[in-house]
Image (cartoon, rainbow, N blue to C red):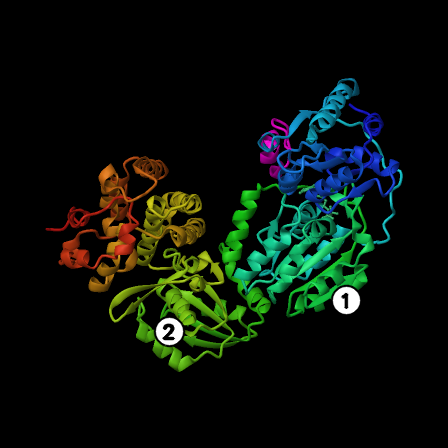
Amino acid sequence: MINVKDIFDLLKENNVNCFCGVPDSLLKDFCAYVTDNTTSKEHTITANEGNAIGLASGHFLATGNPALVYMQNSGIGNCVNPLLSLTDDEVYNIPLLMFIGWRGEPDKKDEPQHIKQGKVTDKLLDAMGIKYSVMPETFEEARPLIQQAFDYMRETNCPYAFMIKKGTFEKYTLINKKQSAYTLGREQAIETVIRQLKNTDVIVSTTGHISREVYETRERLGQSHKQDFLTVGSMGHSSSIALGIALEKPNRTVYCFDGDGAFLMHEGATAVNASKGLKNFKHIVFNNEAHDSVGSQPTVANGINISKIALDSGYTKVYCAKNEKELLKVLPKFINEKGTCLLEIKVKCGARGDLGRPKEKPWENKKIFMENLNQIGFCYHGAIENLSKILKNENSKNVLIFTGKKSYLSIKPTIEKELEQCKITYFNDFVTNPREEDIKSAIEKLGTKFDTIIAIGGGSVMDFGKAYRFYTKMPVKLIAIPTTCGTGAEATNSAVIYVRGIKTSLDDKSVLPDYAIVDSQFCENNPKYLKACTAMDAYCQAIESYWAVNSTPLSREYAKRAMELCKDNIMQYINCGDEVSTENMALASHLSGKAINISRTTASHALSYMITFEYGIPHGHAVALTIAQLIALNETVSENDCNDKRGIEFVRERIEEIKEINCPNIADYFRMLCDIIELETDLDKLGIKDIELIIENVNESRLKNNPKKLSKADLKMLFGRTANV
Ligand SMILES: Cc1ncc(C[n+]2csc(CCOP(=O)(O)OP(=O)(O)O)c2C)c(N)n1
């Protein structure tokens, strides 16, 4: 290990009289020594690393001596511009010495945000043409290398960098530590705020201890992490991430949890945040006047007024709290503010010694966060218990409820218990596979005086509720409560309605219900045939989604889980209907809905709509009629008829995976399954005569989403097993 005094003295011997940069935990002993042994003229902690390159350049222009710039490797991004357009030998040719903390050094354990950065640190320096060395582990070895670096800088006027590994410097404890003037702990303040947020609110928290404390607070309160985007890197960009979300999700209040260091690093974002004039953007700065997460080096935040900066940047209202009491007083005002506002909370430095770290990977955090941002979902036996909480949260008083005609009667008492405080208007005057005229006449009768819409029932009821909100453009929350384990309609942003007899899909982001309550107890007592139809719909959706041309890794993940659940539970669910298999099928159906919401369905669904319309065969049954043959046909996909731009190999791999998940002999498996769950597949017995008519009216956009291009003859083959065509 290297004694920091030795290094410091060597730098001084070489006329380094300017030290600047942004702190890093790997350099904290060195930075502490610099703080204790320099004047404020000699040492500057800059707002970002690019500023440090600028300051070092100014120092060279004024003195002819190189400065020392320190930073974490994540700061390289902030200095690429001044390194390439200011100090580079093809521009002004200015020397400076860089100490770069090498986080994420390959083969060493580190946080996820450092892994990539660590792998490419040397390559970034190479690409910029900056000469560098790894700092040796002893001063004896380091001294000649550092000397050579100075010789090189004198000779060429080019910058030189040292990559500093973890544990290079001996421990040094800061003597001139400033005592914090504040008493409130940051984690305590975070908990106080989180306790007052709604379950529709969203947090984007900055890198370092703040994100870790948000995570730990949720754990302590027994809450999930789905409302929080924990920015593990990208220091200074959290408020811009929050802005990006707030612009797209006007119904969600987005809170940025910032640090003073991060706030200052890209302070220009403040004015831009304000310029959008959003009502749903709220900025909180936990100001401890330090870079607490990396060694508590001071920021300049103690000499400035962050709230005033925000106010002068255009925020409509700012608040400041210096202790718990003040925080509790201003929080309700801040939360209810109807404009872009900022709350500065003065907190003391320091964090718990046993502060944990998120257990999930960043991409896992992103996934559950995005899911929750799209829709808030509850999916388990008894999930209806969430309804009253949602209504309270939404301040719902006047609720419009769409239901099925008969299906609702048995569950009415359970639902109404959740709605005790609300005025209820029921409506069920529409047909299965609703028509546009039903929706228009409902609008005439009911109007738009409601503050919440609930759709409770099967796919058609769900579609009706979605279409009602879409047609009326009512700015109200839509809560979907399916009572069949099948369509997954509660999770999709499309609704099927018939316009003058033609099946039409309303596809729009605004069609997606805000909440989905999937309570499997409502599906337990459904008649066997209904269960068979809806379960096959869910199963076929998952399969079709998995091979769909528009599938993505995320849609396939949903579809895979849905297929697994269907395979293991479908027979038990239909034949016995116990709690576990029903709960699993309800989840399968919800996941298959999420899957097709991304990928859409393919050929079996494309053909099903006309079968349902013309012959009155329920949707899931209609889909099941062709799925076995479609599997067999899709397996024959060739170069000439591959619809998927990702290529034939890609499609074949997906089909192989479908077989692995379900059954190697998958087409036969589905034929057998239909027999066991007693879904008739004999077209004659079902009275389906006019195959030509069905093919003529196939849904073209779903058909194009099939991995194999299907000709009319192919489509006929899909009915081939039983039809005389
Ligand atoms: C570009 C960049 N530079 C430096 C770092 C190292 N770093 C991580 S957290 C942190 C301090 C953040 O300070 P602040 O925002 O005030 O939050 P606090 O740690 O005080 O809670 C620093 C400098 C980084 N992650 N990214």
The spot of residue 155 in percent (x, y) is 71, 25
Using residue 83 as the reference point, say whether residue 538 is left or right of it: left
Secondary structure of the residue carrying tag 1 is helix
Compute the Cα span from label 2 to label 1: 47 Å
**Residue 638 in view here:** no
The disc at residue 197 is none
The boundaries of the magenta stretch are: 104-123
Instruction: Confirm or deny contact between disc 2 and disc 1 (CB under 8 A).
Output: no
Q: Which residue bears the numbered disc 2?
A: 428
Q: Quadrant of residue 104?
A: top right
Up the image or down, 529 lies above or below 427; here it is above
As drawn, which residue projects farthest toward the left?
Answer: 724
Mark 2: which amino acid? Asn
Q: Which residue bears the numbered disc 1?
A: 329
Up the image or down, 536 lies above or below 499; here it is above
Residue at 70% across, 42% down: 49
N-terminal of the pair, mark 2 or mark 1, is 1
Secondary structure of the residue carrying tag 2 is loop
Residue at 22% across, 60% down: 610
The spot of residue 380 in percent (x, y) is 49, 54
Mark 1: which amino acid? Lys
Which mark lies nearer to you, 2 or 1?
A: 1
Which image quadrant shows ligand 1?
top right
Q: Does the magenta-highlighted stretch encompass residue 105?
A: yes
Q: Does the magenta-highlighted stretch encompass residue 197?
A: no
